[in-house]
Image (cartoon, rainbow, N blue to C red):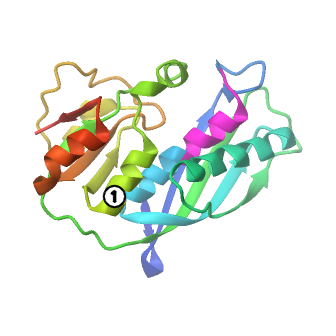
Amino acid sequence: MRNAVLLPNDLVLTTDNSAGIGEKEADVVQVTDEVVGYFAARVALMEQWAAGAHPISIVVHNFSGNKSWNKYVDGIEILFVEIDRPCPVITGSTESNMETLQSAIAVTMIGEQQTASVENYTWYVYGMPCVGEDVMTESEKIADMKKIWDGINSGLVGRIWPVGSTGIAEECKRLGLHYELNSWDVVKSAGPATSVLLGIANNRIKEAKLHFGTYFEEIN
């Protein structure tokens, strides 16, 4: 597992947060709250998949005020529409006593761990690292969640390891991987997991290249 917590009864807890991104005047990056909710949930979901789990419950910690709640929920629901899966029940809390100058949100997921089906695989990186406004302006370069989910279900993908703020190089080091990715910025933050390391089944490499398309390259 990457940053997940294994709970009793094969339950898995993952979480992600963001601050200074949203619709408030003082936010560093100006985007809709729906977009903020979507990408916070995207990271938490990737962490679930990295632990071999899928969420059954979602908790939203909203520090942006009552007006943001429904928009955050809408963004999370869009993510599950994208992967063509029912959205788990969403609950949580809103800070409504104190008004903040900047937006802030955390999304926590609890999921059920499932049995891995792919044992022999080769690591690839999928999706270019993007952070801040680049996530919106270069959206065609980031990892596609539906393609990843379909890859998991078809047995094409055996392992998942989302790339965070420390970049591709650090995540490769955590996995003990030697990397030579000359056309990639391996130290740049991948923001809301715009890049992900995928363990591709060795007998389906050619199929994977067709499935994931551009911005998909072998690591080792």
Please name the residue shown 29% across and 29% down the image: 215
Q: Residue at the bottom extreme?
A: 9
Q: Secondary structure at mark 1?
A: helix
At which x and y percent is residue 107?
A: 61, 50
Residue 133 higher or lower than 86, as above or below: above
Judged by its main secondary structure, the magenta piece is helix
Few, some or many residues within 10 Å of mark 1 (<14, 14–19, 20+): many
Amino acid type of the residue tagged 1 in the rendering: Ile
Please name the residue shown 36% across and 64% down the image: 52
At which x and y percent is residue 42?
A: 52, 45
Q: Which residues are magenta?
A: 30-41
Please name the residue shown 69% across and 37% down the image: 34
Residue 3 seen in render? no
Q: Quadrant of the C terminus?
A: top left
At which x and y percent is residue 158?
A: 25, 58
Horizontal relation, residue 206 to residue 74: left or right: left
Please name the residue shown 78% across and 26% down the image: 101
Residue 183 higher or lower than 44, as above or below: above
Does residue 83 belong to the magenta stretch?
no
Q: Which residue is mark 1?
A: 152
Residue 14 seen in render? yes
Please tell me how many numbered marks the rendered image carries.
Answer: 1
Q: Residue at the right extreme?
A: 97
Q: Quadrant of the N terminus?
A: bottom left
Closest to the observer, 147 or 191: 147
Does residue 34 belong to the magenta stretch?
yes
Horizontal relation, residue 177 to residue 106: left or right: left
Horizontal relation, residue 85 to residue 90: left or right: left
Closest to the observer, 17 or 37: 37
Residue 116 higher or lower than 33, as above or below: below
